[in-house]
Image (cartoon, rainbow, N blue to C red):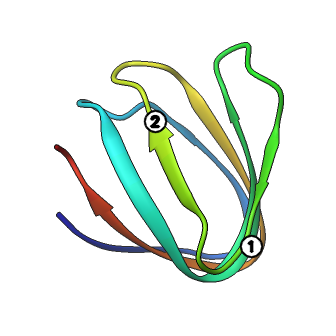
Amino acid sequence: MGVWEGKPGVFVGAPHADEVFVVLSGSATITAGQDAPVSTAQGDIVRLAKDVEVRWDIAETLRIFYIFP
């Protein structure tokens, strides 16, 4: 578990384990695999699946608290 911060822009990666996170501040649109894009903002809870490529379109500096359950 920890806190991650991403600056505005695009970030692409895949979690090495299932991940759950809470958006502490900022906003982003997240596209995981072939799923429809999801807009996130403060207070949202998101789950990402292991090894699925995720595209983060970060609109304003994003801070999340994540955990690998």
Seen in the picture, residue 45 relative to 69 is either above or below; the reply is below
Location of mark 1 (residue): 27
Q: Residue at x 46, y 68 (%)?
A: 22
The residues tagged by marks 1 and 2 sit, at their Cα atoms, a distance apart of 17 Å
Q: Is residue 8 visible?
A: no
Q: Nearer the viewer, residue 23 or 55?
A: 23
Answer left or right for 34 relative to 18.
right
Q: Earlier in the sequence, mark 1 or mark 2?
A: 1
Seen in the picture, residue 27 relative to 32 is either above or below; the reply is below
Other residues around mark 2 within 10 Å, as few (<14) / some (14–19) / many (≥20):
many
| Secondary structure type for disc 2 | strand
Q: Nearer the viewer, residue 21 or 51?
A: 21
Q: Amino acid at mark 1?
A: Ser
Q: Residue at x 46, y 35 (%)?
A: 48
Quarter of the picture containing the C terminus is top left
Q: Residue 5, position in %: x, y?
A: 47, 76
Q: Are marks 1 and 2 in contact (CB under 8 Å)?
A: no
Q: Amino acid at mark 2?
A: Leu
Answer left or right for 39 relative to 5.
right
Answer left or right for 45 relative to 55.
left
Q: Residue 41, position in %: x, y?
A: 72, 73
Quarter of the picture containing the N terminus is bottom left
Instruction: Report which quarter residue 65 is drawn in.
Output: bottom left
Q: Residue 56, position in %: x, y?
A: 67, 49
Location of mark 2 (residue): 48
Q: Residue at x 82, y 36 (%)?
A: 37
Count of numbered badges drawn on the protein: 2
Q: Residue 15, position in %: x, y?
A: 35, 35
